[in-house]
Amino acid sequence: MKGGEAVEGWGWARKVQVVGKFPLQYSADVKIVWSNEQCAFAVETYFSQCHSIVAVQRAFRTRYQIPPRDRVPDRKSIVLWVENFRETGSVSEKR
C-alpha cells in the first residue's frame, strides 16, 4: 500500500498516509448522510440525557447497532441538529 491510497473498511472510504508498514494519519473523505429518523433520535436523546453529546453518541451506537470503531454523529452534527430543531421545530436541513 502506497501513501495516500484509498482504503475500504468499516463502511466508509478513507485515505491513509503510510510510511513503511504503519499508517500515520487517517482522514475521512466521505460524508455520511444521516436519516431524519436518526437525527430526531439524536435530538430527543440530547434533551433527555441532560445535554450530553457523549451520551447521545453512546445511545446512538446502541440503538442502531453500530460496531465499536465505526462512525457515529460527531459533536458538530448533533449541535447543528439541536440548533436547527430549536429554530424551526424540525431536524430537516434549513432551506
Image (cartoon, rainbow, N blue to C red):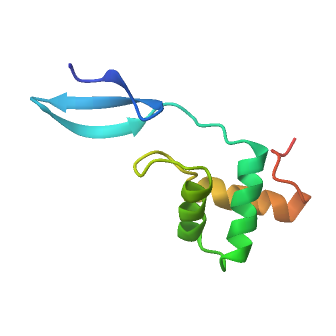
Residue located at (68% from left, 69% from top): 46
Residue 39, given in percent of the width and then of the height, sits at 73, 52
Q: Nearer the viewer, residue 95 or 15?
A: 15
Specify whether 81 is left or right of 61: right
Q: Is residue 53 above or below residue 27?
A: below
Specify whether 85 is left or right of 69: right
Residue 36, given in percent of the width and then of the height, sits at 78, 45
Q: Residue furthest bottom?
A: 50
Residue 30, given in percent of the width and then of the height, sits at 52, 31
Q: Residue furthest right?
A: 89
- Rendering quarter of residue 21: top left
Residue located at (30% from left, 31% from top): 16
Specify whether 87 is left or right of 53: right
Q: Is residue 68 above or below residue 15?
A: below
- Rendering quarter of residue 55: bottom right
Q: Is residue 14 above or below residue 1?
A: below
Give the quarter of the figure containing the C terminus: top right
Q: Is residue 50 above or below residue 80?
A: below
Task: Tally the numbered discs.
Answer: 0
Give the quarter of the figure containing the N terminus: top left
- Rendering quarter of residue 28: top left
Specify whether 75 is left or right of 27: right
Residue 51, given in percent of the width and then of the height, sits at 66, 75
Residue located at (9% from left, 29% from top): 20
Residue located at (49% from left, 46% from top): 71
